[in-house]
Amino acid sequence: MIRHLHPTDSPRILHFRASAGLGDTCTLVNALRGGPSKFPTAKYATIALSPRAWQSCWVESQRGKINSVLRAGPRSGKQAWEISELYLRNSKSSLILDLLEQIAVQAGGAGAYRIFIRIPAGSNASDFAQKAGFSTIYRETIYQTTSTHSAATKLGISDDFLKLRPRYQSDDGNLFRMHNVVTPIAIRIKTGQTSEDWAAGMERLGRKSSEWILDLPTGEIGALIQRSTTRTQHMFNINWAATAGGQLGGIVAAALKETDDVSAVTAVPDYKHALAHLLANIGFKKQANYEVMVKPLTQPISEIQQVFAAVS
């Protein structure tokens, strides 16, 4: 039976950890932090006791034993959901199909138009996801360097070469237009046909991240830079306009700005060849590969069969 995580599951969570493998999915932030990890027992024991939190978690249980734990919810808006974590008891990979099919029902019932999932390359979870109606949007590579300052020095560009400003909500329309110009049509079709849908599916680098805009003299947006720094790691993500391609080195320099000499890491989709080449030239190394997938949720909500068991 698949149902919500419940406060009474706390003892079962402890038993589940002993036989759970590594996670089968992760968010962008967790991919940048090293990918799926062992089951975080303390985290889920806490979630089980919080009504607001456990409503975003589901378990598959039989005879009082938990066999899988899944966490999902909106990305940046209600129109787009994401499966952020999926843990299975060893030898229970066959449960993935039912879990993915049923969480899609839950997402559609909550008003989502699509649901995303990020799976490590080579995982059999990808096969189950395809059977559940997911398709690949793109594949991405995690690039990392151990020294932010070394990478910046190799660029040979001052980090204040470009003048940036904070991102505002009013930028969404121009950012969506930039996205439509630089993103292959096969990807655009799957990630949102309107500015609102696209914005709902955007990924961010956590609550404490900052977002910066490069304006072009034409009045168009030249780049969006996302940054998030801790004491040991600097994460960044960039997207840039075709007309700003000649400034890619300066954009990367700005993305590395104002950090201590810590590790730097970013994710590069397989269609951004210029960025992958530039990062390799300044000392970034490939660390991992992921498959980013999506399932459209187009059924009218009134026709969706509610298959989740009621929480008792």
Image (cartoon, rainbow, N blue to C red):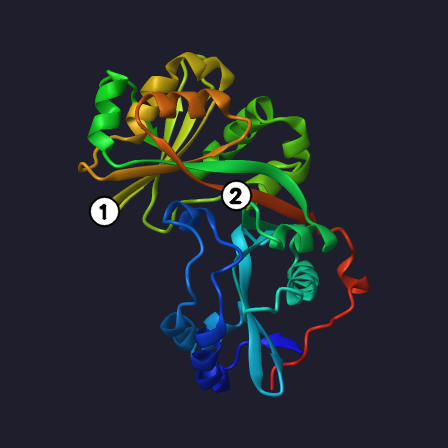
Kindly identify which residue carries mark 1.
232
User: Which of 47 and 60 lies nearest the eye of the viewer?
Assistant: 60
Label 2's element?
Answer: strand
- Toward the viewer: 251 or 127? 127
How busy is the neighbourhood of tag 2: few (under 14 within 10 Å), some, or many (20 plus)?
many
Where residue 211 sits in the image (x, y, percent)?
A: 36, 37
Q: Quadrant of residue 131?
A: bottom right
Residue appearing at x 46%, y 70% in the figure: 53
Residue 66 image point, x, y percent: 55, 79
**Picture disc at residue 290:** 2
User: Is 259 placed above or below 102 here?
Assistant: above
Looking at the rendering, in which quadrant would you find the C terminus? bottom right
**Percent from the top left, x then y, of residue 44?**
43, 72
Q: Amino acid at mark 1?
A: Thr
Residue displayed at 57% across by 43% down: 291
In this view, 189 is above or below 279: below
Residue 112 quadrant: bottom right
Q: Nearer the viewer, mark 2 or mark 1?
A: 2
Sequence-wise, the earlier of marks 2 and 1 is: 1
Q: Residue furthest right?
A: 303
Q: Residue at x 21, y 36 (%)?
A: 259
Q: Mark 2 to mark 1: distance in Å?
A: 23 Å
Indicate the secondary structure of the residue bearing disc 1. loop
Name the kind of residue labelled 2 in the image.
Tyr
State whether residue 208 is above or below residue 265: below
Residue shown at 62%/45% (left/top)? 293
| Quarter of the N terminus within the rendering | bottom right
Badge 1 crowding class, 10 Å Cα cut-off, few under 14, some 14 to 19, many 20 or more, is few
Does 12 sit left or right of 307 as displayed?
left
In screen coordinates, is 44 left or right of 284? right
